[in-house]
Amino acid sequence: MVTVPRRPSAAPRPPTTAPAPAPAATAAKATKAAATGGAHEAAGRSLDLTLLAVAVAGVSMSAPLIAATAAPALAIAFWRNAMAVGVLTPVALWRHRAVLRAMGRRALGLSGAAGLVLALHFGLWLPSLGMTSVATSTALVTTTPVWTTLLLRLRGHRPPGLVWAGTALAVVGVLILTGIDLSTGTRALAGDALALGAGMAAAGYVLLGAQVRRTASTTAYTFVCYGTTAVVLLGACLVSGSALGGWSGTTWLKISVLTVTAQLLGHSLLNRVVRGLGPSTTSTAILLETPGAALVAALWLGQTPPAAAYPALAVVLAGRALVVPADSRA
């Protein structure tokens, strides 16, 4: 019997572990990552500021374009929203179809309510531009943050004292401005009242939209909201007998430019940048809409408000400038 010797078993190898990175290497990687993140953040903020400037320029064109368009105010408001819905429809039904289907009754109801209030806003503001100056109408309609603050107070929100000071200052400016227009005629005063009512309606639109956007995308919300607004304004045009067509090519061009600059480009970019820049920076920048619209109206339409109106406009803007940043820190 031949015995075959066994091969000696190999000695167990110690477990291999990766060498711990040197502290200097770890610190270098962290520094590089922080620098990269900071660069991306700075680039993103720079892009948001650029888009914000474009948005403010877009909304500043709104009032002068409306004042220069030879069409009924309600018809302009209808086509502005209807054209926007036409542009949003492919995007909403293709890319946001699931979000639209997932919107519950509450979100759909609030979006519809926001559309109704937005229709009221347009129905009041656009006629005011034919009754008072562009500068005055724009200053009064952009008092929205003041009315938003008051509505929030009724719901239990307690704003800081600086907000109340800004609100009081803005109201004083409004009283001075309307007093000046009263001296020029009741038509201008009626235009002021319409613009002020439009600013109040916009406050309701802002609050309703803020509720919906907690659960729905901006595209889904605006699609339902603008659609409701267009339907309501179409009904208003039919009831009032406002013509919906038969205008010159120049008029249609102005309505198209209004839709692109103010409705799609202006408001859409504001919704885009508010996430990165915050509501305070975004809302404060919109203060530039009033002087921007006044400048365009002066250069293009030759329309300038009375000299006495400029201090009142400054008081309104100063009051609003106090309300927005202080309320965002509350």
Image (tube, rainbow, N blue to C red):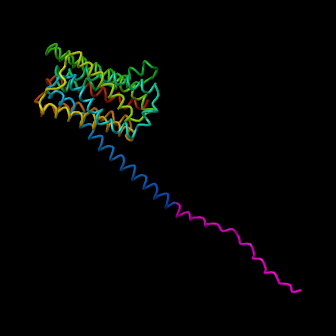
Q: Identify the residue at image location x=35%, y=32%.
A: 223
Per the rendered image, the range of residues in magenta is 1-26
Quadrant in the picture for residue 329: top left
Residue 328 x/y as whole percent = 40, 31
Q: Residue at x 89, y 86 (%)?
A: 1
Quarter-wise, where is residue 322 in the image?
Answer: top left
Q: With 150 as the anchor, is 57 left or right in this view?
A: left
* Residue in the foreground of this view, choosing between 266 and 108: 108
Q: Which residue occupies the extreme bottom position in the image?
A: 2
Q: Residue furthest front?
A: 1
Residue 34 in magenta?
Answer: no
Residue at the extreme top: 186
Task: Tally the marks.
Answer: 0
Which residue is most to the left? 302
Residue 53 vs 186, above or below: the answer is below
Residue 107 placement (x, y as % from top left): 44, 27
- Depth check, front residue: 92 or 118: 92
**Who is closer to the viewer here, 136 or 221?**
221
4 to 317, vertically: above or below: below
Identify which residue, 36 or 246, lies in the foreground: 246
Left or right: 18 as drawn, with respect to 260: right
Residue 249 in picture, x, y percent from top left:
12, 33
| Magenta residues, dominant SS class | loop
| Residue 81 sits in quarter | top left
Residue 88 in the image, given as x and y percentages of width and height: 32, 36
Quadrant holding the C terminus: top left
